[in-house]
Amino acid sequence: MTLGTLVTVVGSGATNLILFVLENGTYEITGNQAIPGAGLVDFAGFARAAGFPRVYSFRRTEDYEAALPGILTGEGPVFVGVEMEAGGEGPISRSDREEARYLKTSLAEWSREFRRAVTHPGE
């Protein structure tokens, strides 16, 4: 959704990052709205243009499985695009009935929990 992030990742100098982009043609988490240009956009091409030193793109599960050990070794940043079928679920909500816990907690609360976990492990 924010292709400028690709340039930011490369510019950061991070060498231990692998970015997986699951390409299913939709914004699945918000209700499966179609991505503009779905099927026409080359996300791996964007990653190459942004300067990713290692870029992979897969359509077949077998090819992905065979390449995965090599993807997980060596310096990054690494971009991995994996084409897959779109899901059929509706959008995730922030209601009390939502099972995804991360959507029920505010960013501020998650930050406080993370800080506690880092500064006071085991509490």
Image (spheres, rainbow, N blue to C red):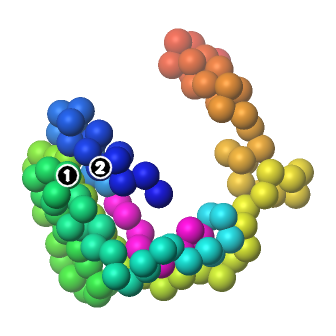
Which of disc 1 and disc 2 is earlier in sequence? 2
Residue stretch in magenta = 20-28
Would you say residue 24 is visible in this rendering?
A: no
What distance separates the C-alpha of mark 2 from that of mark 1?
Answer: 6 Å
Q: Amino acid at mark 1?
A: Ala
Q: Is residue 62 left or right of residue 94?
A: left
In the image: residue 123, left or right of residue 34: right
The residue that appears at 47% across and 57% down in the rendered structure is 1
Residue at the top extreme of this rendering: 119
Task: Please tell me whether residue 79 is drawn above or below residue 112 in the rendered image.
Answer: below
Q: Secondary structure at mark 1?
A: helix
Judge from the rendering whether residue 18 lies leftward or rightward of residue 54; answer left or right.
right
Q: What secondary structure predominates along the stretch shown in magenta?
A: strand
37 or 76: nearer the eye? 37
**Residue at x 69% of width, y 76% of height:** 89
Q: Residue at x 37, y 64 (%)?
A: 21
Count of residue discs: 2
Residue 114: quadrant of the picture: top right
Quadrant of the frame with the C terminus:
top right
Counting from the top left corner in percent of width and height, residue 12 is at 23, 33
Query: Mark 1 and mark 2 in contact (Cβ < 8 Å)?
Result: yes
| Residue matched to label 2 | 6
Label 2: element kind: helix
**Mark 2 surroundings: few (<14), some (14-19) or many (≥20) residues within 10 A:** many
Where residue 102 sits, quadrant-wise, is top right
In the depicted structure, whether residue 57 falls above or below residue 88: above
What amino acid is found at the position of numbered circle 2 in the picture? Leu
Residue 71 location in percent, x, y? Answer: 18, 61
Q: Quadrant of residue 46?
A: bottom left
Label 1 belongs to which residue? 50
